Image (tube, rainbow, N blue to C red):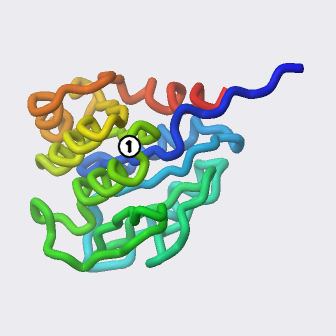
Amino acid sequence: MMTQAEPRFDAVAIGASAGGVNALISIVKALPASFAPAILVVMHVSPERPSSLACLLGEHCALPVAEALDKQPIEAGTVTLAPSGYHMLVEPDRSIALSFDEPVLFSRPAIDPTFESAALAWRERLLAVLLTGASADGTAGAAAVRAHGGTLWIEDPATAHAATMPESALRAVGADAVVPLERIGPMLAELTR
């Protein structure tokens, strides 16, 4: 009797900024309902108004999509978004902690705090994916992911709406894979097959 192999990753952390909405839609629409790892998404959003990103991604995703709540356990097979105005951290027990700490590179939520805390919580069981963006947010987080044994994919700057973020991380820490945007969703989907 054949059994399905255990997924290599328990969690996927995705960071995006300028041009990230379309990038995230292209990724989540490729994921099957059987996708096993938990997905944490940090998108730079304005703190001036509530974000509609959860509704928007939910329209294109077979998995449940919701904004994070403080202290909620992180569940497999779900997409959890950092809410507007808060950093989303992963606690050692793999629950969410929302933080009102100072913005990182002018952003709150910022990618670095999520990547850094997720790297500590999951170590080699974490896959981090850094997408398009116009700042260096994500570079320190990418370094933490690699330092703790996680896997780092970076969007090919040539396909990024804004190449600054992927280029910054690539220069600083490299990547396990540099992936064109259109391949990221299918490659993630393969993790569950």
The quadrant holding residue 148 is: top left
181 sits to left or right of 192? left
The quadrant holding residue 108 is: bottom left
Please identify the quadrant where the N terminus is shown: top right
Question: Where residue 130 sits: x, y (%)?
Answer: 30, 40
Against 103, is 138 above or below? above
Q: Is residue 151 visible?
A: yes
Residue identified by numbered label 1: 123
The quadrant holding residue 64 is: bottom right
Q: Is residue 40 or residue 50 the one in the foreground?
A: 40
Residue furthest right in the image: 1
Mark 1: few/some/many CA within 10 Å (<14, 14-19, 20+):
many
Q: How many marks?
A: 1
Q: Is residue 73 or residue 185 the one in the foreground?
A: 73
98 sits to left or right of 70? left
Q: Is residue 23 or residue 72 the one in the foreground?
A: 72
* Residue ID at (17%, 41%): 165
Tag 1 secondary structure: helix
Question: Where residue 14 sits: x, y (%)?
Answer: 38, 46
Question: Where residue 182 sits: x, y (%)?
Answer: 43, 27
* Residue ID at (34%, 65%): 89
Please identify the quadrant where the C terminus is shown: top right
Q: Is residue 54 or residue 14 the one in the foreground?
A: 14
* Residue ID at (60%, 49%): 61
* Residue ID at (27%, 53%): 116
Against 126, is 104 above or below? below
Q: Is residue 43 visible?
A: no
Disc 1 residue type (three-letter): Arg
Against 169, is 186 above or below? above
